[in-house]
Amino acid sequence: MHLVLYGRRTWRGSRQEGAEVEPAGGPKDTGPGTEGKPAGPQDGKKREKSPFAYLNMGMTFGVTVGLFTALGYWLDSKYGWSPWATVTGALLGVVAGTYHFLKGVL
């Protein structure tokens, strides 16, 4: 466990006399009039996500569908179930990808 004491790290939480310990998440005060309030969105408003977060969700959706479809294709080629495992894998991939996407958006 490391504690930050005036910009220096100490080992195993040992304190120096008179040193103030900064909280693990950083200082909570962000300026005048915000004493004791946590930094971040105020008044219950959600922060907007960056476009890259949505791009990541879209890529995750595509990769999920692709992997489930590839698994279904492999099962089709191994057991001769063509095309049912591929179709089932694609549908499961769409369901899993949609769940992950909606979980990230909402």
Image (spheres, grey):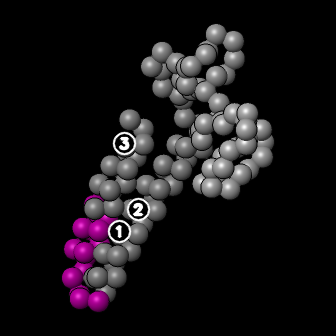
Q: Are marks 1 and 2 in contact (CB under 8 Å)?
A: yes
Q: Nearer the viewer, residue 97 or 24?
A: 24
Dot 1 or dot 3, earlier in sequence? 1
Q: Nearer the viewer, residue 50 or 67?
A: 50
Location of mark 1 (residue): 68
Location of mark 2 (residue): 64
Dot 3 or dot 2, earlier in sequence? 2
Q: CA distance from mark 1 to mark 2?
A: 6 Å
Residue 32 placement (x, y as % from top left): 69, 12
Location of mark 3 (residue): 102
Q: Main secondary structure of the magenta part?
A: helix
Amino acid marked by disc 3: Leu
Q: Are marks 3 and 2 in contact (CB under 8 Å)?
A: no
Q: Nearer the viewer, residue 29 or 71?
A: 29
Circle 3: element type: helix
Up the image or down, 58 lies above or below 105; here it is below
Q: Return the mark for residue 99.
A: none
